[in-house]
Image: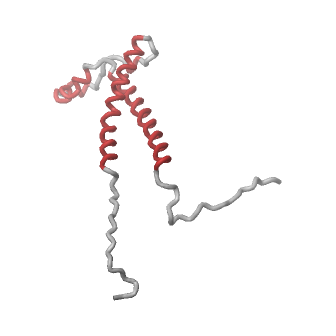
Amino acid sequence: MSKHRSNSIKVVKERSGQPHFLWRGIGCVMMLVIPVMSAAIAYEVINYGLNNNWPIPFQLLGTPRYPDLFYRSSGMMIILSPITAIRHFYAYAVTAMIFMILIGGVMSLIYAYVYRMVGPAQYGPLDAPPPNIKIKRYKR
C-alpha cells in the first residue's frame, strides 16, 4: 500500500453538456405557441384596425397577387390557393411577424432577469478577482 492512496473509490457523476429535458420541452412548446399566439393577435388587431379606420397601408390590404409564372403552373396554384383566399393576408403576416419579435424580445428580457437572479455566480472559484482600479478624472 502506498502512502497517499485511498482504499475507497469515489464515484463522481459527470454532468452532461445538454440542458435539462424540461428546458428543451419548454423551448419546443414556445416555438409552437409564440407563432400561433402572434398570428391570432395579428388577426384580431388588423380586424379591429379596419373596423376603427386605422391608417393601415393599402399595399397590405386585399388578396395576395403572385407573379404570372405562378398562375401558369397548376402545381404552384394548388399549394398557394389557400393563401390566395385570405383577404388582407399581407397585413396579417407583417403584423404577426412584428408580434413574434416583440413577444420573443419580452420573453428574452424576462429570462435574462430571472437567470441573473437565480443563475450561477459571475465569477467561479478559479477566476481571479476583478481589478481594483480607481480612475481619476484628468484635470489640466
| Quadrant in the picture for residue 134 | bottom right
Residue at horizontal 35 percent and vertical 33 percent from the top = 34
Image quadrant assignment for residue 65: top left
Q: Nearer the viewer, residue 109 or 98?
A: 109
Please tell me in which quadrant of the rendered image residue 25 appears. top left
Q: Is residue 50 above or below residue 75?
A: above
Residue 18 placement (x, y as % from top left): 33, 55
Q: Position of residue 78 (x, y in %)?
A: 18, 26
In the rendered image, which quarter contains the C terminus?
bottom right
Task: In this rendered view, identify the residue nearer to me: 138 or 11.
Answer: 11
Q: Residue at x 24, y 28 (%)?
A: 69
Identify which residue is drawn at 60% across, 60% down. 130
Picture layout, residue 3 above or below residue 65: below
Reply above or below: 83 against 31.
Answer: above
Residue at position x 37%, y 16% in the image: 47
Q: Quadrant of the N terminus?
A: bottom left
In the image, farthest residue toward the front: 8
User: Relative to 124, is 70 above or below?
Assistant: above
Point out residue 12 in the picture as x, y percentages from the top left corner. Answer: 34, 67
Residue 17: x, y in percent? 34, 58
